[in-house]
Image (cartoon, helix red, strand yellow):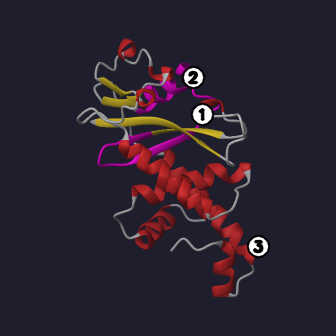
Amino acid sequence: MDFSATDVAQLTGIRRKAVTVIFLKIRQRIAQEAERASPFSGEVEVAECYFGARRVRGKRGRGASGKTPVFGLLKRNGKVYTEIVPNCSKATLQAIIRGRIAPETIIHSDGWRGYDGLVDVGYAKHYRVHHGKNEFARGTHHINGIESFWSFAKHRLQKFHGIAPHTFYLHLKECEWRFNRRHSNLYAESLKLLRNHPL
């Protein structure tokens, strides 16, 4: 039900500190499960996003100060995979794409220069929409799916009123796990995960 540690402590009578430790261990198992994801194929949307405090005045977009860059892949009508990255350069993004996406895949992206040259490295079916030119879809070519995930993740993380940098990765992976099982019984999925990988 996605209660906070404080809510769970009040409901159960267990100390908040103990609940926080248990939540941390569960999130670690969720993150490990996410990293075992199979390579993506079919049609995949790719995009980068920035997480953190509201932007500093005068700092915008990909140069936004103090924000954490995250790269995401979403299989159309399927699952999402996210990865915290040091930057959104061509070398960084293409290394993840080549490690996570099969060459025959249809890739949809925006016009960011980090995606330049995907055709040259074997991804012959790469389609782009140029948000900077107010183009958000050309027929079936769009990245609305991954943008929907970014919206979901940011909305969910807002309720924590700030996340410590050393736990952001675990919270991000929990968002990924919840999104990927949005049509499933999360309680049953949680039990299955913890039976296979006990705390």
Residue topped by disc 3: 17
Give the residue at x 39% y 15%.
Answer: 121
Give the residue at x 29% y 36%.
Answer: 43
Residue type at the position of mark 2:
Ser
The answer to whether 195 is drawn above or below residue 139 in the figure is below
Residue 81 in the figure: left or right of residue 157: left
Residue type at the position of mark 3:
Lys
In magenta, the rendered stretch is 73-100
Q: Nearer the viewer, residue 131 or 45?
A: 131
Residue 100, image x, y percentages: 43, 33
Give the residue at x 43% y 31%.
Answer: 131
The answer to whether 181 is drawn above or below residue 114 in the figure is below
Residue topped by disc 1: 61
Q: Is residue 97 magenta?
A: yes
Residue 37 visible somewhere in the drawing: no
**Residues at marks 3 and 1, CA–CA distance in whole angstroms:** 37 Å
Q: Secondary structure at mark 3?
A: helix
Residue 162: image quadrant is bottom right
Q: Is residue 16 magenta?
A: no
Of badges 3 and 2, nearer the viewer stands 2
Residue type at the position of mark 1:
Gly
Q: Secondary structure at mark 2?
A: loop
Q: Which mark is residue 92?
A: none
